[in-house]
Image (cartoon, rainbow, N blue to C red):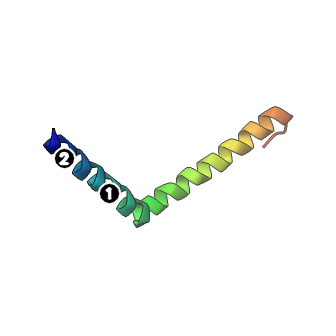
Amino acid sequence: MESVRIVFTIVSFVTFAGIVIWAFSKAGRRSATVANADLIADDDRVRNARTGAQQ
C-alpha cells in the first residue's frame, strides 16, 4: 500500500511540473491567448444576442 502512495505522489508531481512548464512555455502562452480571445468573443456574441444588437 505504501508503494501505491509513492507512485501516486510521483505521478502527481510530474503532472504538476508538466502543467507549470507548459503554462510558461511559448506554446502554452499562445494557446492561452487564443482561448482568452475566444472567451471574450463568445461573451460579446451572448451580450449582443440578448440585446438584439448586430455585429
Q: With respect to residue 35, does 23 lie above or below?
A: below
Q: Residue furthest front?
A: 2
* Image x and y of residue 8, in percent: 24, 45
Q: Which mark is residue 18?
A: 1
The residue at 81%/33% (across/down) is 50
Q: How many marks?
A: 2
* Image x and y of residue 38, in percent: 60, 48
Q: Which mark is residue 7?
A: 2
Is 4 or 42 nearer to us in this picture?
A: 4
Is 17 or 2 nearer to us in this picture?
A: 2
Q: Amino acid at mark 2?
A: Val
- The answer to whether residue 1 is left or right of residue 38 is left
Mark 1, secondary structure of its residue: helix
Task: Tell me how far mark 1 sits from mark 2, CA to CA.
Answer: 16 Å
Q: Are marks 1 and 2 in contact (CB under 8 Å)?
A: no
Q: Answer with mark 1 or mark 2, whichever residue precedes in sequence.
A: 2
The residue at 18%/46% (across/down) is 7
Q: Quadrant of the C terminus?
A: top right
* Image x and y of residue 9, in percent: 25, 49
